[in-house]
Amino acid sequence: MLLTSLPRHLTSRRGAWITLICSLLLAVAVIGGLRGAEVVNDHGAAPPASESARAGELLAELPGADVQHLVLVTTRADGTALTEEDLGMLGRLGGQLPTTGDVAGPIPSSDGLAALLQVPVSVDGEDSGALRELVDEVRTTVAAELPDTLTVETTGGPAFGADLAASFDGANVRLLLITVGIVALLLLLTYRSPVLWLVPVAVVGLADQVAAVLTARLGAALDLNFDAGIISVLVFGAGANYALLLISRYREELRRHEDHRQALAVAWRGTVPAILASNISVVLALATLVLATIPGTRGIGVAAAVGLLVALAAALLALPAALAVVGRGAFWPFVPRPAAGDDAGTSVTADARPSLRRDPWGAVATAVARRPWQVLGAGAVLLAVMATGLIGTEVGLSQTERFRVAAESADGLETIAEHFPAGSAQPLLVVARTQHADAVEQAAAAVSGVRSVGVGASAPSTAGDITTLSVISDAAPGSEHERDVVQDLRAAVHGVPGAEALVGGAPATDVDVRAGAESDLWLIAPLVLAVVALTLALLLRSLVAPVVLLGINIASTLATIGAGAWLGRQLFGFPALDTPVPVLAFLFLVALGIDYTIFLVHRVRHEAAQVGTRAAVVHGVRTTGVVITSAGIVLAGVFAALGILPLVTLGQLGLIVSLGVVVDTLVVRTLLVPALITVLGERFWWPSRPSHAVGSDDVDVAATEHALSR
């Protein structure tokens, strides 16, 4: 059988070296052969079928669609009104900027404190480097030509794209270094060996690089949109978890076997079902994201699934081969060895666990087994309190609120909003048939909240049978009022017969992204739960266990999102959760959280066949406590590292998932799940029945503790 022959090959003297060399050659070939593809990372992309996306596609087909506008907003450094001389300098500046057409302006504000220049520039959407050079050239020219008495901020779509790209300069490298450092430190603390941590870090690090080039190439081929930082964190976190589970069982088996290769083979066979079930459940859960309407969400699902499969291959093939080569000495200075008189073939049973009372995890498990109802009650209160953070939580950030770092383009939008109609910073674009343009303009002008309608500089005006109108509202960007204006404007222009009008632009895109994210949540969440339930049912051969475990998983997930949203508001000043955060947080918390359930409950079921369910719960917590806690802390740490990236979206996701993993590790898996299994007893496994030896629901907890500690 494969489960017998493969571990024997991976751990044999010759097979281990062959596996390692082949793995290294394959990794080098993949990294060298596929490197060079770039990942598209458009966090604000609307669903392709949405009205704003269709309007954007129509605009892209018009002559001049490659021309966008930089907006230069100017104020005096001392806060006084602009003078005629200032406006004259701005007018002359327009002739010195790199443009593809006539510069509009200066356009003074009604309060006289600010003025705008609208600068048409040619933009190649696929060349981010050229875009940044162009924006930098404009800003350099402005700084050289205007005196220090004037403050000029360059904003607009091209400037936002350039600033976003610039904000990620070196960020992914810092993320990788911090992630490696976190994993290395926690492995060093867990195993207290200056040697052992190098093995999993090297293997998982190589897997991360392979996953990076594979997902980038896949993204380019399938036109996927995703954040590479999230993929890297998932690969490192999952890979480290698999490594911890294997190494923990390996160390346990080294105390029973003189031959480290035999111990490793036994450990591999003992852990592969849990690792496979964990990986498959997460990969299938991520695969459900292909049904999402938001391009960024769909792209993350595909890329993350590929990355986790790479992590799985590294953990089950390359890692055991590396451990076999390094040998027992990898655990130096605390090298585990069999005690005198140990029988290598003896399974661990109740009578072979003499140190339960001295073991902290055994003590916790015994206390839970004594008073499961009190533990469940306290846990329910804790989760309910955490869930109250959902009260008052809003979803949706404006464009300026999505940056965690200072950005001139975001500051420019805020300046425009202070001195011009609030919607001037991000006008709505209405695309309609030219012969009905006048009727569309009149309908738009009649909408409450619309300040002006006309041919603006934000898009081509008229080309053939299509006319584009620029609509400026009095609504602050990202506000509920702005969303109402978008909906009212759409209702008005759609009512013009024959116009076939579409409303696009940044505010309309935000509305469509919100609607798409909400739709995705209600579609993806049930599918994720179904995938996880099916995985648990097959692994545990039970119908009761999946329902119970999913119920508590959902409760802890909602509680964590609530607590994370509250902490974000109180500690970091986040006004709301960004649009994609709820669906991604739910997915990661449910799918990753179930990992630890699988690690624990799979071990409990194995032990239940020998000592009964209640005793097995105590031993299961005792034997998996260290590895689950270590794995949870590693995963929480790598997700927390997302906070160094410049987007609020990633910071919020990192905060919520890292908090959720800690709660899942220390509360759910250590206390609540053992308490639930203890209360249900053998009914937990229905319709199967793993217990065949002495020990069942009739076994008193005190007697169980006595047997375990005898």
Image (cartoon, grey):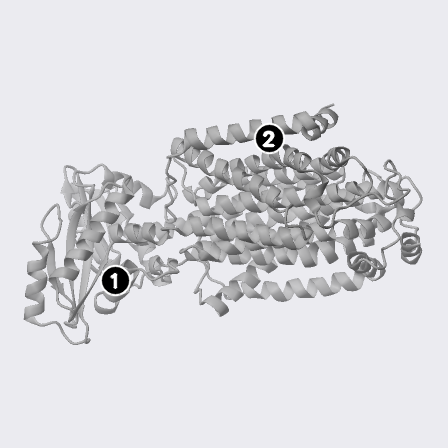
- Total count of labels: 2
Residue 129: x percent and y percent?
A: 27, 44
Q: Residue placed at 32% from the left, 43% from the top? A: 53
Tell me which residue sits at (19%, 75%) in the image.
79
Secondary element type, mark 1: helix
Q: Quadrant of the N terminus?
A: top right
Residue 463, image x and y in percent?
A: 15, 39
Q: Residues within 10 Å of mark 2 (few under 14, many from 20)?
A: many
Q: Amino acid at mark 2?
A: Leu
Binning the other alpha carbons within 10 Å of mark 1 as few (below 14), some (14 to 19) or many (20 upward) gives: many
Q: Is residue 332 visible?
A: yes
Residue beneath disc 2: 20
Mark number displayed over residue 412: 1
Q: CA distance from mark 2 to mark 1?
A: 54 Å
Helix, strand or loop for disc 2: helix
174 to the left or right of 245: left
Q: Is residue 475 left or right of residue 464?
A: right
Left/right placement of residue 19 relative to residue 35 reads right
The quarter of the picture where residue 427 lies is bottom left
- The correct choice, above or below, for 27 with respect to 617 in the image is above
Coordinates of residue 163 in the picture (x, y in percent): 30, 54
Q: Nearer the viewer, residue 405 or 652?
A: 405
Pick the front one: 174 or 390: 174
